[in-house]
Image (cartoon, rainbow, N blue to C red):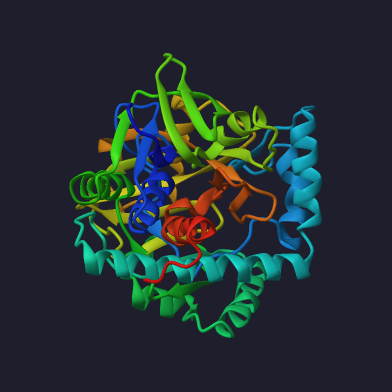
């Protein structure tokens, strides 16, 4: 490469692609690199598809703390906690436990909500400038509850969010059936939280379409098959080297590597509190009673989402599993669990596109957005809300480099 770029973005999932967009829109010369053959082929490829702007609840909470012994012993089939003697896990775990208080849960949830609202505004602005076809629809979302105490606790969070101007409604079982008739088969339902302004969209289609706009209209370079191995500073510039020996020169790098970020940043002397939470999904044709509204089953920890004319189902949480491959047994369990939850939502015998992804969790359920040194931006740790947070997080990170930029 004959010239140094302003910024090289590491990672071409939804976080990396939106990061490249935020930087390029500020007039910077940008390249984006990824170890895969194209954009959004790992954790962003086939996630739940929900843009959960109103649902920003932090994972660490008093309710989860009470359930931890049950989870550790394998009592919760939807949540698998893999204990580890790794000091990084012990540190992460202690920080997570400290965030399980009522006060910190509330603060973290509201901080996540603020970022989610920024993302919604940034997504609307992007679509106004560049209409992108990615099966986007403001379909609304229902969180289903089968336990009265959990439903009451969720209703209390509703009050916290209402102060921030978020629209959500507490529904009785019959109200939920009226909003979404397909729930008639949901046995044992006690109530639901309805978020009418939440949306859905295909993150893989979004990433591919936005990257084409970046290349065609903003001059962003793409380097796929580039497995970033090391970054060295020399003569006032960053030299990014791939595992294959290729080198890209830039004034800055922006790390958007998800669960792979801790390993890459550690060699630069920087630690980030990220631990993987593996999830799975499948896609199937709609069934006789396919939901119109996006569904989150809080008891089984699975989501149902109409996407591209199909039903996307995602779920299972394996905290501490670093293997991104699809485990056939876990994937089959997800299909079976979904069928028991909503038996007519999809044609489960035609389930396809098995996917697994490593969601990068922080103890606070908030991403790490920082500029720890002048030549480095970090935008990592978006957890289960990477698709939701991506646009807002990118704007925040880009503002660290160009704080004087005005939209």
Question: Which residue lies at the image location 40% right of the left edge and 26% below the top edge?
Answer: 35
The picture quadrant where one finds residue 294 is bottom left
Label count reads: 0
Question: Which residue lies at the image location 44% right of the left edge and 27% below the top edge?
Answer: 326
Position of 200 relative to 272 (above/below): below
Residue 201's x, y, as percent?
Answer: 30, 56
Q: Nearer the viewer, residue 57 or 250?
A: 250
Residue 346 placement, left or right of 75: left
Residue 281 placement, left or right of 136: right
Q: Can residue 58 be seen in this view?
A: yes
**Where the C terminus falls, by quadrant?**
bottom left
Residue 349 placement, left or right of 75: left
Position of 130 relative to 321 (above/below): below
Position of 272 relative to 168 (above/below): above
Residue 198's x, y, as percent?
Answer: 39, 69
Residue 391's x, y, as percent?
Answer: 41, 59
Residue 255 placement, left or right of 269: left
Question: Which residue lies at the image location 38% right of the left edge and 56% below the top edge?
Answer: 22
Q: Residue lying furthest top in this view?
A: 244
**Where the N terminus falls, by quadrant?**
top left
Residue 242's x, y, as percent?
Answer: 45, 21
Question: Which residue lies at the image location 26% right of the left edge and 53% below the top edge?
Answer: 307
The picture quadrant where one finds residue 151 is bottom right
The picture quadrant where one finds residue 199 is bottom left
Position of 118 relative to 210 (above/below): below
Q: Can residue 352 be seen in this view?
A: no
């Amino acid at each position: 490469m004959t010239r140094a770029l302003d910024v090289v973005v590491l990672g071409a999932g939804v976080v990396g692609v939106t990061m490249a967009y935020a930087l390029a829109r500020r007039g910077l010369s940008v390249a984006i690199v990824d170890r895969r053959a194209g954009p959004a082929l790992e954790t962003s490829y086939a996630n739940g598809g929900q843009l959960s702007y109103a649902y920003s609840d932090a994972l660490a909470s008093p309710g989860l703390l009470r359930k931890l012994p049950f989870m550790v012993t394998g009592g919760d089939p939807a949540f698998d906690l893999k204990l580890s003697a790794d000091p990084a896990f012990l540190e992460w775990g202690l920080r997570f436990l400290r965030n399980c208080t009522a006060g910190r849960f509330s603060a973290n949830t509201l901080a996540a909500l603020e970022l989610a609202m920024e993302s919604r505004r940034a997504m609307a602005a992007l679509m106004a400038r560049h209409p992108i076809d990615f099966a986007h629809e403001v379909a609304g979302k229902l969180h289903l509850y089968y336990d009265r105490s959990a439903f009451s606790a969720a209703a209390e969070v509703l009050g916290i969010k209402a102060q921030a101007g978020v629209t959500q409604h507490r529904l009785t079982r019959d109200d939920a059936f009226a909003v979404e008739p397909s729930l008639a088969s949901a046995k044992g339902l006690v109530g639901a939280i309805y978020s009418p302004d939440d949306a859905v969209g295909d993150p893989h289609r979004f990433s591919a379409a936005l990257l084409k706009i970046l290349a065609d209209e903003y001059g962003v370079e793409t380097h796929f098959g580039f497995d970033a191995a090391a970054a060295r500073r020399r003569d006032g510039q960053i030299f990014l080297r791939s595992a294959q020996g290729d080198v890209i020169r830039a004034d800055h790098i922006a790390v958007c590597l998800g669960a792979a970020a801790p390993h890459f940043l550690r060699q630069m002397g920087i630690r980030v509190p990220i631990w993987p939470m593996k999830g799975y999904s499948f896609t199937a044709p709609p069934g006789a009673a396919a939901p119109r509204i996006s569904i989150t089953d809080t008891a089984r920890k699975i989501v149902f989402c109409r996407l591209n004319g199909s039903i996307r189902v995602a779920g299972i949480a394996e905290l501490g599993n670093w293997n991104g491959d699809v485990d056939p047994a876990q994937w089959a369990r997800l299909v079976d669990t979904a069928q028991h939850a909503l038996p007519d939502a999809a044609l489960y015998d035609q389930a396809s596109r098995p996917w697994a992804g490593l969601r990068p969790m922080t103890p606070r359920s908030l991403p790490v957005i920082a500029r720890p040194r002048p030549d480095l931006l970090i935008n990592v740790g978006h957890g289960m809300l990477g698709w939701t947070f991506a646009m807002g997080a990118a704007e925040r990170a880009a503002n660290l480099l160009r704080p004087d930029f005005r939209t």
